[in-house]
Image: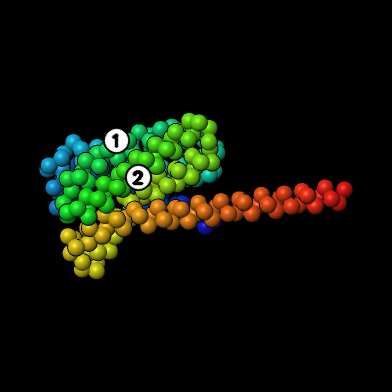
Amino acid sequence: MIKNTLWGLMTLLTILVALYAIGLLFAPDIRPPFVQNLFTHFPKVTTIHFLGGGVAIVAGAFQFNASLRMKYRSLHKLLGRFYVVSILFSGIAGLILAINSVGGIYVQAGFGLMATFWLVTTINAYQLIRKGKVSSHESWMVRSYAVTLAGVTLRLYLGLSVVLGIKFFDAYPVLAWLCWVPNLFIAELLLRFKRNKTTAINKRTLLESDEGVVGE
């Protein structure tokens, strides 16, 4: 129940962010100044980044519903392909934008490393599933999507900074890191918890099996 609720909330937020990204493409009047600056100087690259990111964040969300994944295997594979391809385009575009972003070296480094991690984790996840290593693939997909969710956390933190009265150019260098590094940290904690739980179950099963043999 809790998992489904959290997944539903996450999916709703990703859809809203994707719709916002599409809105930025077709409605220039709603673009914040820093976004308009990107469209002015890098129109094609910015379009690819926002469009690819919008596709990735929604496609990825539906990959984390276990019942949907098991019931619709073909759809899972199709969405996976959309996810990987969209990140390849959006990630490379994001790297270009990061190098040329406003805010100085801290912003450029933050978003540049984010784009790099996004590409590396996604490509690694894809290569692992091609080799049939499902468990490792799932772990790297969690890492990949943790970075993808920066699209959500960045908007949330930007909104919070406005509420708190923090000036954009003061907040932006921090948000360039805050929007994705904690996401990866949480992903690693969840993966470690899952591994420890699996190990504990395997040990208990083995112990029960040994006790059964002794009892015989």
Which of the 4 image quadrants contains residue 103?
bottom left
Classify mark 2: residues with Cα within 10 Å, few (<14), some (14-19) or many (20+): some
Observer able to see residue 92: yes
Q: Could you tell whether 61 is left or right of 101 in the image?
A: right
Q: Nearer the viewer, residue 18 or 104?
A: 104
Give the residue at mark 1: 89
Q: Helix, strand, or loop for circle 2?
A: helix
Mark 1 and mark 2: span between their CA atoms? 14 Å
Q: Amino acid at mark 2?
A: Phe
Sequence-earlier tag: 1 or 2: 1
Checking the image for residue 117, the label placed there is 2
Name the one closer to the observer, 206 or 74: 206
As rendered, which of 74 and 81 lies closer to the eye?
Answer: 81
Instruction: Answer with left or right where residue 118 lies relative to residue 98.
Output: right
- Which secondary structure, mark 1? helix
Across the whole image, how many numbered discs are drawn on residues?
2
- In the image, is residue 143 above or below residue 77? below
Q: Nearer the viewer, mark 1 or mark 2?
A: 2
Quadrant the N terminus occupies: bottom right
Q: Is residue 48 left or right of residue 138?
A: left
Q: Is residue 54 visible?
A: no
Q: Quadrant of residue 95?
A: top left
The residue sitting at 56% across, 51% down in the picture is 195
Which mark, residue 71?
Answer: none
Q: Residue 56: percent from the left, percent from the top?
A: 35, 41
Could you tell me residue 116's position as x and y percent?
31, 43
Residue pushed farthest bottom?
A: 164
Q: Residue at x 27, y 58 (%)?
A: 175
Q: Residue at x 20, y 45 (%)?
A: 99
Image point 13% across, 47% down: which residue?
Answer: 37
